[in-house]
Amino acid sequence: MVTCYLRYVIDPYKLVEFEKYAKMWIPLVNKFGGVHNGYFLPSEGANNIALALFTFPSLTEYEQYRIDSFNDAECLAAFDYAKSTRCILSLERSFFKPVFE
């Protein structure tokens, strides 16, 4: 099992647009076999940092999701939305092995 951690630097004046983008991706990750653990939007503290966590059974399955997402109409629409709104300034991607017990 592998969890993808995304740290976004967002435009704080486009929080509504970023939240719409986030809501687009949750069902898409699930559609491709992952489990989305949610997006976390700014509340207190930094107003331009957002996080997302989602889990796949393996890194191989995550990598297949990434390949497939570039050929899926709904995923392409989400990518285009982020690009057209410019709500995301940058992002970092890291992977973690979860421990539950």
Image: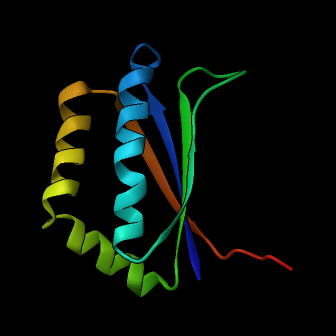
In the shown orientation, is residue 90 left or right of residue 2? left
In the shown orientation, is residue 71 left or right of residue 53? left
Q: Nearer the viewer, residue 26 or 62?
A: 26
Q: Quadrant of the C terminus?
A: bottom right
In the shown orientation, is residue 44 left or right of residue 85? right
Q: Residue at x 34, y 61 (%)?
A: 28
Q: Residue at x 34, y 46 (%)?
A: 24
Q: Residue at x 39, y 64 (%)?
A: 29
Location of residue 18 by image quarter: top left
Total numbered circles: 0
When the figure is inspected, residue 5 is found, relative to residue 46, above or below; the finding is below
Q: Residue furthest right?
A: 101
Location of residue 41 by image quarter: top right
Residue 77's x, y, as percent? Answer: 17, 47
Residue 94's x, y, as percent? Answer: 53, 61
Q: Nearer the viewer, residue 4 or 72?
A: 72
Q: Residue at x 47, y 49 (%)?
A: 92
Residue 50's x, y, as percent? Answer: 54, 36
